[in-house]
Amino acid sequence: ELRPYLDLALAHVYVLNSEVWRWGGGSPTKLTDAAAEEKLPEWSPERLPASLEALFTRVLAASDLLKSEPVENWAGILPKGTMPDSCRPPLYDLAVHDILDFYGKNVPDKTLEKGLALLDGLIEFHRDDADIDALADARLSRLVYEDSFAELPWKEKEARYAAALDGFIAEYLEKTEIGALAVYYRAQRLKQAGELVKARELALQGSARWPK
């Protein structure tokens, strides 16, 4: 069954085409503002949200299939991600992060609810992995994602996020390079708060454990 794989790849094509269309850089057709919406291509700004919603609905319906498909098998078709394959080994992980990005840009009223559900499912999927990279990545992604939606007074929000990152660093820094990513996030917040010495000390701790 190739449909979910092709739907995921097509979603990337739509997003790329939409960016070209939006900036007027060589769109495949020339349409005026008066053109009927149904005649616009699926990747046009007017139709992109509905197009991606349909694609991602079908992708999620095939989650079990994507969970068994190594992402490296699609390296020549899908764009290379920002994380190592060991952190997001099957296509399911890539799909979840694509969908999170989609919801954040197009359906903000449902973003937090749906996003947390997807990330919780990702965490559960990787809970018993022999390699902890994917589990750590999913947990850190959830931590950062939840913080971005936290509706708390600024000091309380910062304290909560700092405590969560500190706990994550204590648990994972010695075990996986994802711990170094958490160090980066924490050091960035310290720097923004003007605590430059603490930020530097923490950054050095992370680079000492994971120098590359």
Image: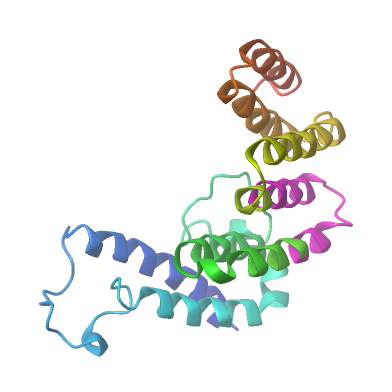
Query: Can residue 138 be seen here?
Result: yes
- Residue situated furthest front in the rendering: 153
Q: Nearer the viewer, residue 29 or 183?
A: 183
Query: Can residue 86 be seen here?
Result: no
Q: Does 17 lie within the magenta span? A: no
Q: Quadrant of residue 99?
A: bottom right
Which residue is at 67% across, 29% downward? 186
Which residues make up the magenta segment? 121-145
Give above or below for 25 relative to 34: above
Q: Nearer the viewer, residue 2 or 81?
A: 81
Give above or below for 13 relative to 84: below
Q: How many marks?
A: 0
Question: Where is residue 49 shown, x and y percent of the image?
Answer: 41, 74
Quadrant where the C terminus is found in the figure? top right
Which residue is at 87% across, 50% downward? 130
Question: Where is residue 11 shown, x and y percent of the image?
Answer: 44, 70
Q: Does 140 lie within the magenta span? A: yes
Question: Where is residue 111 shown, x and y percent of the image?
Answer: 58, 66
Question: Where is residue 175 shown, x and y percent of the image?
Answer: 84, 34
Q: How is the image coloured?
A: rainbow
- Report the predominant secondary structure element of the magenta stretch: helix
Q: Quadrant of residue 169?
A: top right
Quadrant where the N terminus is found in the figure? bottom right
Q: Judge from the rendering whether residue 78 lies leftward or rightward of residue 118; answer left or right.
A: left
Q: Judge from the rendering whether residue 90 lies leftward or rightward of residue 129; answer left or right.
A: left
Q: Judge from the rendering whether residue 184 lies leftward or rightward of residue 177; answer left or right.
A: left
Which residue is at 67% across, 68% downward? 113
